[in-house]
Image: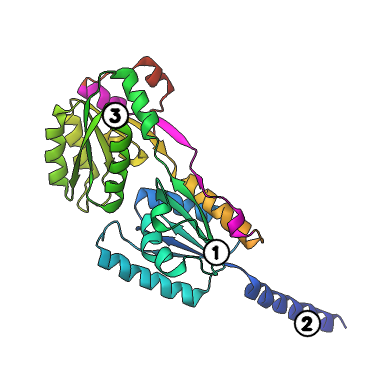
Amino acid sequence: MKKQLLLALLLFSQLYNIYAEEDKKKCLLVMSYHQGYEWNDGIEKGVVNTLYNVCELKIVYMDTKRNPSTEFGQESALKAKSTIEEFKPDVVIASDDNASLYLIEPYYKNSKIPVVFCGINWSAKEYGYPYINATGMVEVAPIVPLLKIVLLSRPYLKKGIYLSSDVVSEHKDFNRYKHEYKKRGVRLTPVFVSSLIEWKREYKMAQKADFIILNNYSGINDWNQGEAIKFVKNNSKVLTVTNYQWMMPYSMLGMTKSAEEQGNWAGQVAKSIIEGIPVNEIPITINKTWSLFVNTELLDSAGVKLSNSVMSRAYRKW
């Protein structure tokens, strides 16, 4: 009798596991960029941590930061589309601009699949959002708060250089910087580069400006961290600022946003959708977490001084 009962319990357990596995929800995370890119990794970490044991999570990397051509983006989107058709996710999380540009807008706008976007720079309107099947978190950099902090130490700023990699998202960022800074009497000149040698040349030339915005090196495929750190330490004369935490080894002052905030929010929303909340009842929002950093070693080597109020509020480690 005991043996029969044991066999019955074992059979029930196996059947329960089969049905539970079949009933498990599926989530697909589409990353616009590649593993190893700090912003990409931060969003992924937030999503993975939030959705642990919530759904079966599959991740697709479009790799469009290192391969910025339209043709590559379109081909990568078709591969992601095939994954969606095979995997049949209950919700798709689309990280950063290119996932929406190449995949979501062309193929899943107002479709039956719930979509949660995150990391789209400044505005989602250019991709047609809002959709009836989508919500998301827009990525807003604290460029005006950063300028206000810079003006505490440099009240007579008139001209700056915006130095960044030559990729679509950096051009988009510059347009917003230019607009906001112009309203406040500061003229920005953009410089976009594709190699480290170009970046070093333009960095030296930019020392004639009042300050330099170091926006991003991702997209410069031959970037060498050690070489770049040594170079800026030996060639910096004016204040350098950034809105990205991973640019702090090369920058003197940074006010940065959080990639994990984007990922955590997207994961929580995906969880809510799985639990039955209609996606069109969840409003589009923006990020709210910023951090202030200073690189004291670079400040000292360049002889650049910041106000006591800035120095007292800023983190020294990033």
Residue 135 percent coordinates (x, y): 52, 55
> Which image quarter holds the C terminus?
top left
Answer few, some or many: residues within 10 Å of disc 2's Cα (few below 14, many 20 plus, some between 14 and 19).
few
Q: Look at the image and say whether residue 4 sits in the magenta stretch.
A: no
Q: Say which element carries label 2.
A: helix
User: In the image, what residue occupies the spot 13% across and 34% down?
Assistant: 204
Q: Say which element carries label 3.
A: loop
Above or below: residue 250 compared with residue 273: above
Q: Nearer the viewer, residue 207 or 108?
A: 108
Residue 208 percent coordinates (x, y): 13, 27
Q: Say which element carries label 1.
A: loop
**Can residue 181 be seen here?**
yes
User: In the image, what residue occupies the spot 20% across and 25% down?
Assistant: 210
The stretch of residues the image draws in magenta is 278-302
**Can residue 53 be seen here?**
no
Label 3 sits on residue: 252
Answer yes or no: do the residues labelled 3 and 1 have beta carbons within 8 Å? no
Of the residues shown, which amino acid type is indicated by label 2? Leu
User: In the image, what residue occupies the spot 50% across and 53% down?
Assistant: 136
Q: Quadrant of residue 186?
A: top left
Furthest toward the top, the residue is 308
Above or below: residue 181 compared with residue 133: above
Camera-nearest label, 1 or 2: 1
Label 1 sits on residue: 114
